[in-house]
Each structure stands twice: as structure tokens, then as C-alpha cells.
Amino acid sequence: MIASQQRLDVLSSNLANISTTGYKSDGVTFAEACERQMNANGGLGQPLGSMGSGPVQTGSYTNFELGPATATGNPLDVAIADAKGAFAVEVQAPDGSTTTAYTRDGSFMLNSARQLVTKQGYPVLDDAQRPITLPQGTAAIAGDGTVSVNGTKVATLGVFSGQFVKTTPTLFTSTVDATPIKGTTLKTQTIEGSNVDPIKSMVDMITINRSYELGQKSIQKQDDMTEKLIQSLPSQA
């Protein structure tokens, strides 16, 4: 029942972000909590195999498969055409310091200072991990990551590879130093949608609910049998 609840929590989070741009679905891994070796002849004979006593969560992971691409017509929207890589953004910590985070959400815009930022206001970084500020004019991003204004190159959009760990629905940190990817192809005027499969998720939710109910009924049956056993014992006068 605990394992089913843990799976359901992750699945619910995935479904809640089914419309979140650049979202990558999460999963959990399980192993046997206690595995017993079974032998014939009262435990003295040949090995017959092993018997588990129930699952326990051993870890979690993020599925980095590509999400569906959606054309927007916005010249500052871009999507990475490969499952590998992420954009770098500058995030301000509560103590005022800034750190580098990574995202697959390429729905960009310009703030009042004409910095290229995400919808959440995080400055987008170039391939040298510097904020991108654009002069007045018509801005565009090309498929090779070139950021230009009125046809003149201003910067190169940074796409980085590394081992990413999710911190928020759309932000990641790098467990090792992320490095810029050369020659990455971007889809312009396009955003990458969530890679959550709604049909599979709903089927999984039904399966998990049934598994939870089965575990609940098993416990209730054991309680009933224990109660009957106690009632069948002779009373001690």
C-alpha cells in the first residue's frame, strides 16, 4: 500500500504538469524489502527459489524523452530538437546570490531591460554562460542558436549537456559541470511540450488504485482471521 501511494504521488505530479512547457516526467524504482531463500526438505534441501515480502522504494528518476513540438509563431520561442541538452538560466537564491540552472522550456521573451528571459523571468545565458541583452530592433533566434537583431548576430544561445537533477517542475541543476554542446539543432518559433503520456498515465492510475485496494483488502482479511482466532481460544478464568 505504501509503494502504491508513492507511485500515485509521482503519477499525480506528472498529470498535474501535462500542460507545462518543457516538463519531463518522473518515475520511481522499487526493490524487494526482504527476500527469503526457499529450500526443499524443510529448508535443508535443494534451493527452490526466493520469495519477496513486498516492495520498498529505492530511488527516483526523470524521463528525458522528447515531448511534442508545437509551433507558436513567436520568433523568440525555440525547442531543442534532441532529447539531450538544456538551456542555461540564471536563478537568484533567497540569500541574493545567483546560480546557474537548466531548463527545456524555450518559451523566451524580452524584459524591460531587453534581456532574454524565460516566462518566469530567469535570464537566459549564452554559450559562455552570460546573460543575453539585445539592442533595439527586431530580434530572432536561428536554428543554430544564433541570436540576432535586425539580421546582425548578437549572441549564441547556450545549450548544455550534463547530468541533470530536477529541482522544480521545469528547472534542473547539474551534478557535474555542464558543458556547451556544439552544433545543436533548434526548432525555431516552436516550444517543446510535456512528455507525459496522458492515456498511459490514466491506465497506470487505475492499476495503482486496484493494487492499493487489493493490499487494503488483504490487511482487512488478516485482521478478520486474527479476530476469529482470538475468539476461538478458550477463555482464561
Image (cartoon, rainbow, N blue to C red):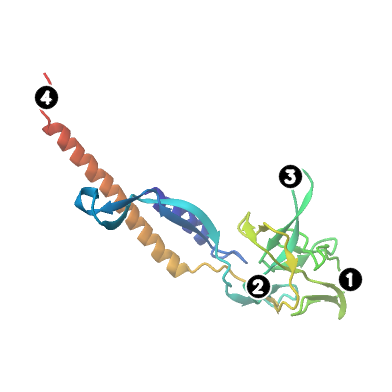
Judging by the rendered image, the residue that carries numbered circle 2 is 191
Please tell me which of labels 4 and 3 falls first in the chain.
3
Q: Rounded to the nearest whole Å, what is the CA distance between mark 3 and mark 1?
A: 32 Å
User: Element type at marker 3?
Assistant: loop
Q: Identify which amino acid the numbered label 2 is placed on.
A: Ile
Real-space Cα separation, disc 3 to disc 2, in angstroms? 29 Å
Q: Which residue is mark 4?
A: 235
Mark 3 vs 1, N-terminal side? 3
What is the C-alpha distance between the residues marked 4 and 1? 92 Å
Which circle's residue, 4 or 1, is located before the other in the chain? Answer: 1
> How far, Cα to Cα, is label 4 from label 3?
66 Å
Task: From the image, state whether disc 4 or disc 3 is nearer to you.
Answer: 4
Which of the 4 image quarters holds residue 226?
A: top left
Q: Position of residue 172 (x, y in %)?
A: 66, 58
Residue 81 in which image quadrant: bottom right
Q: Considering only order in the chain, which callout, 4 or 2, is on the residue closer to the N terminus?
A: 2
**What residue type is disc 3 on?**
Pro
Q: Nearer the viewer, mark 2 or mark 4?
A: 4
User: What type is the residue that disc 4 sits on?
Assistant: Ser
Does the image show residue 161? yes
Kind of residue sitting beneath label 1: Gln
Q: Where residue 111 appears, x then y in whole percent?
A: 80, 62
